[in-house]
Structure formats: C-alpha cells, structure tokens
Image (tube, grey):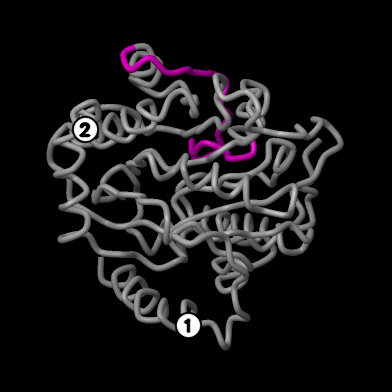
Amino acid sequence: MLDPSPQTAIMTDSGKESDNPLSNQSAPIVTIFALPKPFGGKTDLIQKNSIRSWARLKPDVEVLLLGDESGIKETAEELGVRHASGLRSNEHGTPLLSSAFQLAHQESNTDFLAYCNCDVILTRDFTESINQLVNQAHFSQFIAFGRRTDLSVDRIIDFSQPTQVERLLEECQNEGVRSSNVCKEYFIFNRHLYENIPPFAVGRGNWDNWMIHSAKQNRIPVVNLSKTVTAIHQSHDYSHASLNRWGCYVSGPEAQENRRLGGGRHIISGSTANWKMTRSGLKKELPKLVSPSFWADAPRFTRLLFNLLVK
C-alpha cells in the first residue's frame, strides 16, 4: 500500500542505472508522459499542438498519453504516439499522479522520464538540454524542471514546417510572458526515481513543489533548465474546472489535500534549484538570498499571485 506521508521515498532499488544513457542513439532517451483532458473545442487544439510538438522530437523522445477520457486513445492513434489506460482517480473524479507515475514506469523503458502538462509546446532545445545535462553533469541522478512562457495560440501548428515553427518562436519571443519559477510545466528525472509518490490530484496546487522539495531532502541534485528550454504554455481558461484558479491551486479541497500529502506548500524550497543549465553549460546555483535569478523572479511571482486572486 502506498504510504501517503510527506516522507514517501522517491528512491527505489529497482532499475539499474545505465553506464552511458546516450550510448544507443537510435533508441529514445526520454519518455514524455502526460494526462490529457477530454478532447474537444479549444482544448483539442491546445493539446494536439502540444503532443505534435513532442512527437516531432523523435527519435530521442517517445510520447505516452495516459487516461481513458474522451478522445485520448483516438488522439494517440491519430498522432502516432503511445497510450495506456487504467489511470485511477480520486473521489472527485480527478486523476491521481501516483497512478500516472506508476503507469509511466510500467509502460516505458527509457533511461529518463519527463512529466509534462498537456498544454505545453516543446521544441528541439528540450532534448538538446537533456543531452547537454547528461554529458556535463558529474552526478548520476537528478531532477530537472523549467518555467514556462505564456502565449495565446489560436491555430494548429504543423511542426514539420520550419516556417511555422519559426513564426511561433518569434511570437513567443515578442509577445510571450515569462512566468515565475513557481510555474513548473515539466519534470525530467532518472527512471528509478519517483516510482511511488503520494496520491496527489493532478491540476491542483502544491504537488509540484513537493517534487523539488523532496529531491533536496534526499540529496538529489535539482537543475533549472529555464534558460535553455523553450516551454510555450498555450493560454487557456479554467472552464473545465468547477473552481477558479485560486481554488484549483490554493484554497480548494483538492489543493488542500495535496498540501497535506506533501507536508506543506514548500513554495521557495520547491521552486528553486541548486544547479542551472545555461548556454555556456551547467553551473552551480548561488544560495537563494544572494542569487540574482532568485530576486529577478520576485516580480513574476508577485504578478502570479495577483492573477490568481483576480481571475
């Protein structure tokens, strides 16, 4: 039975680490797994854009969609990615991340796993950063995360067309809004980590901070990839949820339960790294109180709180 306490172990004895994860370049090195919402309307456009962008990262990446909501299996078949059913939910009908992470471990055999929100477009710099990290790091295990850039996208993107991708990246550069480090859109980690996590509700607050906080407690290096990975979050409303954003992330019963399971909010500990990837390579992050990146993020965090309160 899964231990739901904040001290739930994220390390297991299963799975032997590869001596060289990149030795077989013909095989995927990372499995991106996600929990799509039911397809239809604007959600259809947003999620298919995201999944198409991930699928375009083959052969380095394989994509695994989890769940039995409307359209998930059919979309996986349409876009040529994998699908797994059997995702468990809580009493509110919200999928459980503990079930998702277990399925991802069972259904994949890549050296690394990456959880990603299904409204986020990733480009080739995602796999380039993973390769750079694995080749430069002197540590054998890690968890990496990155913040997002918010952008309104109103069209289907054909990621096989360089001109369409270039236009999207230009829009991201000129019109996108960089979010706070608190807004973590993806996690990349060695496959032997996080096999058993508390039964957090997906799409609710506090669980993502637990991911980083618990890694630090277990002396696992945490790497911020925000400077090298373009993660385009396609803006959307919260009409799919019965609560507003504040309720989903802070005050609602599922957010509060996630907080209890994680042993607190861990806002600072759960949103700061001890390493960062830059264009010139992997660097040690400075302590929070003297870190320029920590203080530079403060205005973004303030804006996030304001948006949560008024929207």
Q: Is residue 303 magenta?
A: no
Amino acid on which disc 1 is placed: Pro
Amino acid, disc 2 = Leu
| Secondary structure predominantly adopted by residues drawn in magenta | loop
Residue on which disc 1 sits? 292
Question: How far from the left and from the top, in percent, is residue 86?
Answer: 57, 20
Q: Is residue 54 above or below residue 254?
A: above
Q: Quadrant of the N terminus?
A: top right
Where does residue 154 sit, x and y in percent of width and height? 13, 41
Residue 204 sits above or below residue 293 on the image: above
Residue at x 55% of width, y 25% of height: 28
Quadrant for the C terminus in the image: bottom left
> Which label was assigned to residue 185?
none
**Residue 248 position in % (x across, y down):** 42, 56
- The residue that label 2 is drawn on is 45
Most distant residue in the front direction: 280
Q: Which of marks 1 and 2 is in front?
A: 1
Q: Dot 2: what SS?
A: helix
Whether residue 91 sits left or right of residue 79 in the image: it is right
Q: Does the magenta stretch include residue 89?
A: yes
Tell me: 9 left or right of 177.
right
Q: Is residue 64 visible in the rendered structure shown here?
A: no
262 and 287: which is toward the camera: 287
Q: Which of 84 and 287 is in front in this view?
A: 287
The answer to whether residue 12 is left or right of residue 132 is: right
Q: Residue at x 18, y 43 (%)?
A: 166
Where does the magenta region start and end?
A: 78-98
